[in-house]
Image (cartoon, rainbow, N blue to C red):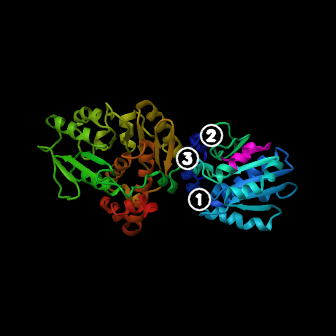
Amino acid sequence: MRPDLNLCAADFLETGIITPARMRAVDENAQALGVTSLQLMESAGKALAASVLDLQPASVLILCGRGNNGGDGMVAARYLQHGVNTNVFYLDYGKRSPASAHQLAALPGCQVNIHPFVSTDDLRALALLFEKADVIVDALLGTGAAGALKEPLATCTAMANASGAKIVAADVPSPGMRADRICAFHRPKVTGSDVVDIGVPIEAEICTGPGDLTLIPARKNTSHKGVGGTVLIIGGGPYQGAPYLAGLAALRSGADIVRVASPVYEPVPDLIFERLTGDRIGTEHIEKLIALASRADVVVCGNGMGTESHDIVLAVAPHCKKAVFDADGLRLPLPKAAGETIYTPHAGEFARISGVKLSADAGHACGRARAVQEAATRLGGTILLKGPVDVISDGHRTRFNRTGDPAMSVGGTGDVLAGVCGALLCHLPAFEAAGIAAYVNGRAGERVAKLSGQGMLASDLMDRIPEELFRRQR
């Protein structure tokens, strides 16, 4: 564990039930930190075997599917081969996960009996093994299961349920399978689980990583214009470039339609310009801004707005379905959208809205995190505190982001981050949107810095953002 998190990492670990989607993200983050999927599977299978041995069986039947859950069961079989009569039934049609295939290849060299099945007839021919088993291990489907079981898995489950054996589920019970014991890996996915540690690095859970990108919903082939989300940017006047940087970042992050409501026009053909008269945003614009905000999925507000328009921000905020408040939108009284809200302050803006100045002693990641968590609880919304290590908290959960480069201190990179947040907030909860936005914006900055060094421009990030954000979907 790196020094800035070494003393407090465990304080920010989440507890209790973890969703399958979040567990997949943690698994992938662990792999990015150097722990391979095969290492995690080995730890899980060994722990599963130990759970089975606690029941002191003479005969064990392990039911394995095609995915990684089946691979866990096959690893367990290797650890049960000494002193326990072990039979492995494995589903032998369709695509098998690479890790499961790797484990299956090792079984012929073990003192276990291997039985492929493709049909209900195959299972019924081996019915005696169900009857003789003291323990049956359910490693059929795992967390990826959805909907009712199809054959031959439905028959396999019925035969296991009808047996007199104790059933131990690997991670989660398959749909319809009874379970006398659930051996959960890393964290429970259902209540009543016995949790075993499989060696997932703490940073895989408390820090953002490439696994978090798995939470981004893929665009369907039947998608039409607008399904990617409609974002409204409100800003500009004193600082004319800021709202346009935010708007372009929102487009690059998957939003379909982005409007910029500003007193200043910039010739950017990809953005829809909503002209506001005068040289600053004032009370005369409130009615128009409310109408625009009510039609948008997300509003990003404050970029380049200056210090004299906060009353307008407060008037418009309740009409926003969701919102990201940045820069000059971060003033007291703090604006809040009707739905979810993200605040994206740097340290000075955080002091302005929270009353907490991050001193040198409290400036390390742990001290910053505790301050942000308390402020998010008190103020409501999700706070993304920008810094050498970003801190994201909704008051209940807290995460750190380590991506980025010192060259990103150039003006405008915060506006880009706000735009990325806005686009992701169209489809994700605020906490997840803020964490992924921080990660992707930082990764884009790292790539630009390798090319441009200290000569980075905020606009240089635009082409790198989709490369990082949608790399899994290409």
Whether residue 308 is visible, yes or no, is: no
- Sequence-first tag of 1 and 3: 1
Image-quadrant location for residue 332: top left
Q: CA distance from mark 1 to mark 3?
A: 29 Å
- Give the magenta part as a residue range: 156-171
Q: Which mark is residue 145?
A: none
Q: CA distance from mark 2 to mark 3?
A: 17 Å
**Secondary structure of the residue carrying numbered label 2:** loop
The percent coordinates of residue 183 (x first, y second) are 70, 45
The amino acid beneath tag 2 is Val
**Secondary structure of the residue carrying numbered label 3:** loop
The percent coordinates of residue 443 (x first, y second) are 43, 59
Question: What residue is pinned by disc 1?
Answer: 31
Question: What residue is pinned by disc 3?
Answer: 147
- Observer-side mark, 2 or 3, equals 3
Q: Residue furthest front?
A: 121
Q: Is residue 169 magenta?
A: yes
Judge from the rendering whether residue 133 lies leftward or rightward of residue 95; answer left or right. right
**Secondary structure of the residue carrying numbered label 1:** helix
Q: Nearer the viewer, residue 49 or 168?
A: 168
Q: Residue at x 25, y 47 (%)?
A: 304
Image-quadrant location for residue 188: top right
The percent coordinates of residue 387 (x first, y second) are 43, 49
Q: Nearer the viewer, residue 413 or 138?
A: 138
Could you classify mark 3 by the number of other residues whose Cα lies within 10 Å: few (under 14), some (14-19), or many (20 or more)? few
- Observer-side mark, 2 or 1, equals 2
Q: CA distance from mark 2 to mark 1?
A: 24 Å
Q: Residue at x 58, y 46 (%)?
A: 148
Q: Are marks 2 and 1 in contact (CB under 8 Å)?
A: no
The amino acid beneath tag 1 is Gln
